[in-house]
Amino acid sequence: MDVVSDILKITGFYNLEFGNILMILIGCAAIYLAIVKKYEPLLLLPIGFGIIVGNMPYPEGLPIGVYDKGSVFNQIYQGVRSGIFPPLIFLGIGALTDFSTLISSPKSLLLGAAAQLGIFATYLGALLLGFSNFEAASIGIIGGADGPTSIFLSSQLAPHLLGPIAIAAYSYMALVPVIQPPLMKLLTTEKERKIRMAQPRKVSKREKILFPIIVMIVSALIAPGSLTLIGMLMLGNLLKESGVTDRLARTAGSALLDTCTILLAFSVGASTKASVFLTAKSLAIFFLGLFSFMVATAGGLLFAKFMNLFLKQKINPLIGAAGVSAVPDSARVVEHFGLKYDKENHLLMHAMAPNVAGVIGSAIAAGVFIGIFR
Protein backbone atom coordinates (compact mmCIF):
# COMPACT_ATOMS: atom_id res chain seq x y z
CA MET A 1 0.00 0.00 0.00
CA ASP A 2 2.91 2.34 0.65
CA VAL A 3 4.17 1.70 -2.87
CA VAL A 4 0.70 2.36 -4.33
CA SER A 5 0.46 5.54 -2.28
CA ASP A 6 3.86 6.73 -3.53
CA ILE A 7 2.87 6.05 -7.13
CA LEU A 8 -0.36 8.02 -6.72
CA LYS A 9 1.54 10.98 -5.24
CA ILE A 10 3.69 11.39 -8.34
CA THR A 11 0.71 11.48 -10.72
CA GLY A 12 -0.70 14.68 -12.07
CA PHE A 13 -4.12 13.84 -10.66
CA TYR A 14 -2.78 13.96 -7.11
CA ASN A 15 -1.11 17.35 -7.64
CA LEU A 16 -3.92 18.91 -9.69
CA GLU A 17 -5.26 22.23 -8.35
CA PHE A 18 -8.08 24.53 -9.38
CA GLY A 19 -5.62 27.06 -10.82
CA ASN A 20 -4.19 24.39 -13.12
CA ILE A 21 -7.65 23.50 -14.39
CA LEU A 22 -8.49 27.14 -15.05
CA MET A 23 -5.27 27.77 -16.96
CA ILE A 24 -5.72 24.58 -19.00
CA LEU A 25 -9.18 25.86 -20.01
CA ILE A 26 -7.62 29.18 -21.01
CA GLY A 27 -5.09 27.30 -23.13
CA CYS A 28 -7.90 25.35 -24.80
CA ALA A 29 -9.73 28.62 -25.48
CA ALA A 30 -6.62 30.02 -27.18
CA ILE A 31 -6.36 26.92 -29.38
CA TYR A 32 -10.07 27.22 -30.22
CA LEU A 33 -9.63 30.85 -31.29
CA ALA A 34 -6.61 29.90 -33.39
CA ILE A 35 -8.22 26.95 -35.21
CA VAL A 36 -11.91 27.84 -35.39
CA LYS A 37 -11.86 31.65 -35.44
CA LYS A 38 -8.42 31.84 -37.11
CA TYR A 39 -7.28 34.62 -34.75
CA GLU A 40 -3.47 34.81 -35.11
CA PRO A 41 -3.18 30.99 -35.39
CA LEU A 42 0.61 31.07 -35.83
CA LEU A 43 0.86 32.60 -32.36
CA LEU A 44 -2.21 31.56 -30.39
CA LEU A 45 -1.95 27.86 -31.19
CA PRO A 46 1.59 27.33 -29.80
CA ILE A 47 0.84 29.74 -26.95
CA GLY A 48 -2.35 27.88 -26.06
CA PHE A 49 -0.63 24.51 -26.17
CA GLY A 50 2.22 25.94 -24.11
CA ILE A 51 -0.26 27.12 -21.48
CA ILE A 52 -1.63 23.59 -21.20
CA VAL A 53 1.86 22.07 -20.97
CA GLY A 54 2.99 24.66 -18.44
CA ASN A 55 0.07 23.87 -16.16
CA MET A 56 0.39 20.11 -16.12
CA PRO A 57 0.93 19.34 -12.41
CA TYR A 58 3.94 17.32 -11.33
CA PRO A 59 5.60 16.50 -7.99
CA GLU A 60 8.01 19.00 -6.47
CA GLY A 61 11.64 18.31 -7.32
CA LEU A 62 10.95 16.86 -10.77
CA PRO A 63 12.74 19.20 -13.24
CA ILE A 64 10.17 19.61 -16.00
CA GLY A 65 8.76 23.17 -16.10
CA VAL A 66 10.25 26.38 -17.51
CA TYR A 67 11.11 27.58 -14.01
CA ASP A 68 13.00 24.39 -13.09
CA LYS A 69 16.70 24.99 -13.63
CA GLY A 70 18.23 22.45 -15.97
CA SER A 71 14.99 21.25 -17.56
CA VAL A 72 14.61 21.18 -21.35
CA PHE A 73 11.80 23.74 -21.25
CA ASN A 74 13.92 25.97 -19.03
CA GLN A 75 16.69 25.89 -21.63
CA ILE A 76 14.27 26.91 -24.38
CA TYR A 77 12.80 29.62 -22.16
CA GLN A 78 16.24 31.18 -21.78
CA GLY A 79 15.89 32.34 -25.37
CA VAL A 80 12.97 34.45 -24.20
CA ARG A 81 14.39 35.65 -20.88
CA SER A 82 17.72 36.56 -22.40
CA GLY A 83 16.02 38.48 -25.21
CA ILE A 84 17.42 36.35 -28.05
CA PHE A 85 14.21 35.28 -29.81
CA PRO A 86 12.57 38.74 -30.33
CA PRO A 87 15.50 40.25 -32.31
CA LEU A 88 15.69 37.12 -34.48
CA ILE A 89 11.96 37.43 -35.14
CA PHE A 90 12.53 41.08 -36.07
CA LEU A 91 15.20 39.92 -38.53
CA GLY A 92 12.61 37.69 -40.20
CA ILE A 93 9.94 40.39 -40.17
CA GLY A 94 12.35 42.80 -41.84
CA ALA A 95 13.06 40.23 -44.56
CA LEU A 96 9.31 40.01 -45.29
CA THR A 97 8.42 43.71 -45.03
CA ASP A 98 8.07 46.09 -47.94
CA PHE A 99 8.65 49.67 -46.78
CA SER A 100 7.76 51.15 -50.19
CA THR A 101 4.49 52.74 -49.07
CA LEU A 102 6.21 54.36 -46.09
CA ILE A 103 9.08 55.64 -48.26
CA SER A 104 6.60 57.09 -50.76
CA SER A 105 4.61 58.77 -47.96
CA PRO A 106 7.02 59.91 -45.21
CA LYS A 107 4.25 61.76 -43.38
CA SER A 108 2.87 58.36 -42.42
CA LEU A 109 5.71 58.20 -39.90
CA LEU A 110 3.75 60.77 -37.89
CA LEU A 111 0.75 58.46 -37.75
CA GLY A 112 2.93 55.62 -36.53
CA ALA A 113 4.38 57.94 -33.89
CA ALA A 114 0.95 59.21 -32.82
CA ALA A 115 -0.23 55.65 -32.20
CA GLN A 116 2.53 55.25 -29.62
CA LEU A 117 0.53 57.61 -27.38
CA GLY A 118 -1.03 54.51 -25.85
CA ILE A 119 2.37 53.33 -24.64
CA PHE A 120 3.17 56.42 -22.63
CA ALA A 121 -0.41 56.96 -21.39
CA THR A 122 -0.46 53.40 -20.06
CA TYR A 123 2.97 53.85 -18.49
CA LEU A 124 1.54 56.70 -16.42
CA GLY A 125 -1.60 54.69 -15.63
CA ALA A 126 0.46 51.73 -14.44
CA LEU A 127 2.45 54.02 -12.14
CA LEU A 128 -0.80 55.27 -10.63
CA LEU A 129 -1.85 51.66 -9.95
CA GLY A 130 1.32 51.05 -7.97
CA PHE A 131 3.57 49.35 -10.51
CA SER A 132 7.26 50.26 -10.50
CA ASN A 133 8.90 52.23 -13.31
CA PHE A 134 10.35 49.03 -14.75
CA GLU A 135 7.00 47.23 -14.64
CA ALA A 136 5.02 50.21 -15.94
CA ALA A 137 7.34 50.63 -18.93
CA SER A 138 7.03 46.94 -19.81
CA ILE A 139 3.23 47.05 -19.53
CA GLY A 140 2.94 50.23 -21.58
CA ILE A 141 4.58 48.64 -24.63
CA ILE A 142 1.53 46.39 -25.00
CA GLY A 143 -0.14 49.41 -26.60
CA GLY A 144 2.21 49.10 -29.54
CA ALA A 145 0.50 45.76 -30.35
CA ASP A 146 3.93 44.29 -31.02
CA GLY A 147 4.46 40.96 -29.26
CA PRO A 148 8.23 40.57 -29.79
CA THR A 149 8.88 44.14 -28.60
CA SER A 150 6.74 43.60 -25.50
CA ILE A 151 8.60 40.38 -24.71
CA PHE A 152 12.01 41.93 -25.35
CA LEU A 153 11.37 44.93 -23.10
CA SER A 154 9.84 42.93 -20.26
CA SER A 155 12.73 40.44 -20.42
CA GLN A 156 15.08 43.38 -19.87
CA LEU A 157 13.11 45.34 -17.27
CA ALA A 158 10.50 43.09 -15.62
CA PRO A 159 11.15 39.39 -16.35
CA HIS A 160 8.82 38.35 -13.52
CA LEU A 161 5.91 39.81 -15.53
CA LEU A 162 6.98 38.37 -18.86
CA GLY A 163 4.21 35.75 -19.04
CA PRO A 164 1.19 38.01 -18.40
CA ILE A 165 2.61 40.80 -20.59
CA ALA A 166 3.30 38.44 -23.50
CA ILE A 167 -0.13 36.80 -23.29
CA ALA A 168 -1.84 40.21 -23.09
CA ALA A 169 0.14 41.57 -26.05
CA TYR A 170 -0.57 38.61 -28.31
CA SER A 171 -4.20 38.41 -27.19
CA TYR A 172 -4.87 41.99 -28.20
CA MET A 173 -2.98 41.49 -31.46
CA ALA A 174 -5.36 38.61 -32.20
CA LEU A 175 -8.36 40.75 -31.24
CA VAL A 176 -7.50 43.65 -33.56
CA PRO A 177 -10.59 42.93 -35.76
CA VAL A 178 -12.77 43.12 -32.63
CA ILE A 179 -11.25 46.10 -30.78
CA GLN A 180 -10.48 48.57 -33.55
CA PRO A 181 -13.69 48.84 -35.67
CA PRO A 182 -15.88 50.33 -32.87
CA LEU A 183 -13.25 53.02 -32.23
CA MET A 184 -12.92 53.70 -35.96
CA LYS A 185 -16.67 54.18 -36.23
CA LEU A 186 -16.84 56.33 -33.10
CA LEU A 187 -14.02 58.72 -34.02
CA THR A 188 -14.62 59.25 -37.75
CA THR A 189 -17.53 60.48 -39.84
CA GLU A 190 -19.00 58.64 -42.81
CA LYS A 191 -17.67 61.35 -45.10
CA GLU A 192 -14.15 60.88 -43.76
CA ARG A 193 -14.34 57.11 -44.21
CA LYS A 194 -15.07 57.63 -47.93
CA ILE A 195 -12.02 59.81 -48.61
CA ARG A 196 -10.06 58.41 -51.54
CA MET A 197 -6.32 58.75 -51.60
CA ALA A 198 -3.97 58.95 -54.59
CA GLN A 199 -1.95 55.87 -55.42
CA PRO A 200 1.50 55.80 -53.77
CA ARG A 201 4.36 56.76 -56.05
CA LYS A 202 6.74 54.12 -57.31
CA VAL A 203 9.84 53.83 -55.14
CA SER A 204 13.26 53.29 -56.69
CA LYS A 205 15.57 50.42 -55.80
CA ARG A 206 18.15 52.90 -54.49
CA GLU A 207 15.59 54.33 -52.03
CA LYS A 208 14.71 50.85 -50.81
CA ILE A 209 18.38 50.04 -50.16
CA LEU A 210 19.17 53.34 -48.44
CA PHE A 211 16.05 53.30 -46.24
CA PRO A 212 17.05 50.52 -43.78
CA ILE A 213 20.56 51.94 -43.44
CA ILE A 214 19.34 55.47 -42.72
CA VAL A 215 16.56 54.36 -40.36
CA MET A 216 18.97 52.21 -38.35
CA ILE A 217 21.48 55.05 -37.98
CA VAL A 218 18.91 57.72 -37.09
CA SER A 219 17.00 55.45 -34.68
CA ALA A 220 20.19 54.40 -32.88
CA LEU A 221 21.24 58.04 -32.51
CA ILE A 222 17.82 59.04 -31.14
CA ALA A 223 17.37 56.02 -28.85
CA PRO A 224 20.48 53.80 -28.56
CA GLY A 225 18.41 51.25 -26.63
CA SER A 226 16.46 50.51 -29.82
CA LEU A 227 19.55 49.32 -31.69
CA THR A 228 18.97 45.62 -31.00
CA LEU A 229 15.44 45.51 -32.44
CA ILE A 230 15.76 48.19 -35.12
CA GLY A 231 19.17 46.90 -36.17
CA MET A 232 17.88 43.38 -36.76
CA LEU A 233 14.69 44.62 -38.43
CA MET A 234 16.62 46.75 -40.88
CA LEU A 235 19.26 44.07 -41.49
CA GLY A 236 16.48 41.71 -42.56
CA ASN A 237 15.03 44.36 -44.86
CA LEU A 238 18.43 45.13 -46.37
CA LEU A 239 18.94 41.42 -47.08
CA LYS A 240 15.65 41.52 -48.97
CA GLU A 241 16.14 44.75 -50.89
CA SER A 242 19.83 44.48 -51.77
CA GLY A 243 19.16 41.90 -54.47
CA VAL A 244 22.40 40.05 -53.74
CA THR A 245 21.39 38.06 -50.63
CA ASP A 246 18.12 36.48 -51.67
CA ARG A 247 19.01 33.15 -50.08
CA LEU A 248 19.72 34.77 -46.73
CA ALA A 249 16.52 36.80 -46.94
CA ARG A 250 14.48 33.67 -47.66
CA THR A 251 16.06 31.85 -44.72
CA ALA A 252 15.47 34.78 -42.34
CA GLY A 253 11.88 35.23 -43.48
CA SER A 254 10.91 31.58 -43.43
CA ALA A 255 12.87 28.90 -41.56
CA LEU A 256 14.48 31.16 -38.96
CA LEU A 257 11.36 33.24 -38.36
CA ASP A 258 9.10 30.20 -38.07
CA THR A 259 11.48 28.36 -35.74
CA CYS A 260 11.86 31.32 -33.39
CA THR A 261 8.12 32.01 -33.45
CA ILE A 262 7.30 28.42 -32.43
CA LEU A 263 9.87 28.34 -29.63
CA LEU A 264 9.00 31.81 -28.32
CA ALA A 265 5.22 31.34 -28.41
CA PHE A 266 5.33 27.88 -26.85
CA SER A 267 7.78 28.81 -24.07
CA VAL A 268 5.85 32.00 -23.25
CA GLY A 269 2.68 29.93 -22.96
CA ALA A 270 4.47 27.37 -20.80
CA SER A 271 5.63 30.16 -18.46
CA THR A 272 2.04 30.94 -17.43
CA LYS A 273 2.06 28.63 -14.45
CA ALA A 274 -1.11 29.14 -12.43
CA SER A 275 0.74 30.18 -9.27
CA VAL A 276 2.63 32.83 -11.25
CA PHE A 277 -0.07 33.93 -13.67
CA LEU A 278 -3.27 34.00 -11.62
CA THR A 279 -2.55 37.12 -9.58
CA ALA A 280 -4.07 40.57 -9.13
CA LYS A 281 -1.13 42.01 -11.09
CA SER A 282 -1.97 39.84 -14.08
CA LEU A 283 -5.55 41.09 -14.13
CA ALA A 284 -4.31 44.67 -13.90
CA ILE A 285 -1.92 44.04 -16.79
CA PHE A 286 -4.76 42.77 -18.99
CA PHE A 287 -6.86 45.83 -18.14
CA LEU A 288 -3.99 48.23 -18.78
CA GLY A 289 -3.11 46.41 -22.01
CA LEU A 290 -6.62 46.89 -23.36
CA PHE A 291 -6.57 50.55 -22.31
CA SER A 292 -3.18 50.99 -23.99
CA PHE A 293 -4.34 49.42 -27.23
CA MET A 294 -7.48 51.55 -27.35
CA VAL A 295 -5.58 54.78 -26.66
CA ALA A 296 -3.01 53.87 -29.35
CA THR A 297 -5.78 53.29 -31.91
CA ALA A 298 -7.55 56.52 -30.96
CA GLY A 299 -4.27 58.44 -31.08
CA GLY A 300 -3.63 57.38 -34.67
CA LEU A 301 -7.19 58.17 -35.78
CA LEU A 302 -7.34 61.59 -34.14
CA PHE A 303 -3.89 62.62 -35.35
CA ALA A 304 -4.89 61.73 -38.92
CA LYS A 305 -7.90 64.04 -38.55
CA PHE A 306 -5.59 66.73 -37.17
CA MET A 307 -3.22 66.37 -40.14
CA ASN A 308 -6.14 66.89 -42.53
CA LEU A 309 -6.53 70.42 -41.16
CA PHE A 310 -3.26 71.33 -42.89
CA LEU A 311 -3.11 69.00 -45.90
CA LYS A 312 -4.38 69.94 -49.35
CA GLN A 313 -4.63 66.30 -50.34
CA LYS A 314 -6.64 64.81 -47.49
CA ILE A 315 -5.82 61.42 -46.04
CA ASN A 316 -8.43 58.92 -44.97
CA PRO A 317 -8.24 59.05 -41.15
CA LEU A 318 -9.00 55.34 -40.95
CA ILE A 319 -5.38 54.61 -41.87
CA GLY A 320 -4.37 56.22 -38.57
CA ALA A 321 -5.72 53.15 -36.77
CA ALA A 322 -3.04 51.10 -38.54
CA GLY A 323 -0.35 53.03 -36.67
CA VAL A 324 -0.22 50.24 -34.10
CA SER A 325 2.37 47.58 -34.85
CA ALA A 326 0.07 44.63 -35.57
CA VAL A 327 1.38 44.01 -39.09
CA PRO A 328 -0.51 43.43 -41.33
CA ASP A 329 -3.69 42.82 -39.31
CA SER A 330 -4.40 46.47 -38.55
CA ALA A 331 -3.97 47.40 -42.21
CA ARG A 332 -6.37 44.63 -43.20
CA VAL A 333 -8.95 45.84 -40.68
CA VAL A 334 -8.71 49.33 -42.19
CA GLU A 335 -9.17 47.86 -45.68
CA HIS A 336 -12.28 45.85 -44.73
CA PHE A 337 -13.81 48.67 -42.69
CA GLY A 338 -13.32 51.22 -45.48
CA LEU A 339 -14.88 48.91 -48.07
CA LYS A 340 -18.11 48.88 -46.07
CA TYR A 341 -18.62 52.55 -46.97
CA ASP A 342 -17.08 52.57 -50.46
CA LYS A 343 -16.62 49.24 -52.21
CA GLU A 344 -14.05 50.67 -54.60
CA ASN A 345 -11.93 52.52 -52.04
CA HIS A 346 -8.99 50.24 -51.27
CA LEU A 347 -6.95 51.50 -48.33
CA LEU A 348 -4.68 48.50 -47.70
CA MET A 349 -1.52 49.89 -49.29
CA HIS A 350 -2.05 53.31 -47.71
CA ALA A 351 -2.60 51.70 -44.29
CA MET A 352 0.58 49.65 -44.59
CA ALA A 353 2.67 52.85 -44.37
CA PRO A 354 1.63 53.80 -40.80
CA ASN A 355 1.47 50.10 -39.95
CA VAL A 356 5.18 49.49 -40.60
CA ALA A 357 5.94 52.93 -39.14
CA GLY A 358 4.30 51.68 -35.94
CA VAL A 359 6.75 48.78 -35.78
CA ILE A 360 9.63 51.25 -35.90
CA GLY A 361 7.89 53.56 -33.43
CA SER A 362 7.23 50.89 -30.82
CA ALA A 363 10.82 49.64 -31.05
CA ILE A 364 12.12 53.18 -30.54
CA ALA A 365 9.74 53.64 -27.58
CA ALA A 366 11.12 50.43 -26.08
CA GLY A 367 14.62 51.76 -26.70
CA VAL A 368 13.77 54.96 -24.83
CA PHE A 369 12.57 52.98 -21.80
CA ILE A 370 15.67 50.77 -21.88
CA GLY A 371 17.89 53.83 -22.07
CA ILE A 372 16.15 55.45 -19.10
CA PHE A 373 15.70 52.49 -16.77
CA ARG A 374 18.68 50.20 -17.49
Image: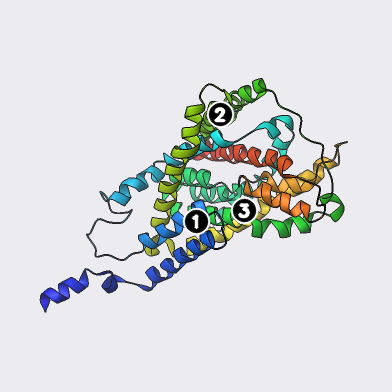
Question: Residue at left 72%, top 53%?
Answer: 336
Near mark 2 (Cα within 10 A), the count class, few <14, some 14-19 or many ≥20, is many
Is 3 drawn above or below residue 282 in the view shown? below
Q: Amino acid at mark 3?
A: Ser
Q: Which residue is mark 3?
A: 292
Q: Earlier in the sequence, mark 2 or mark 3?
A: 2
CA gap, disc 1 to disc 3? 20 Å
Of the pair 161 and 325, the residue shown nearer to us: 325
Amino acid at dot 2: Lys
Residue type at mark 1: give it.
Answer: Leu
Give me the disc on residue 44: 1
Task: Judge left or right: residue 179 versus residue 225.
Answer: right
Image quarter hosting the N terminus: bottom left
Numbered badge on residue 256: none
* Horizontal and vertical percent position of residue 92: 50, 37
Q: Would you call the spot at circle 3 few (<14 residues within 10 Å), some (14-19), or many (20 or more)?
A: many
C-alpha distance separating marks 2 and 3: 33 Å
How far across and how far down the image is residue 75, in percent? Answer: 31, 46
Whether label 2 touches label 3, CB < 8 Å? no
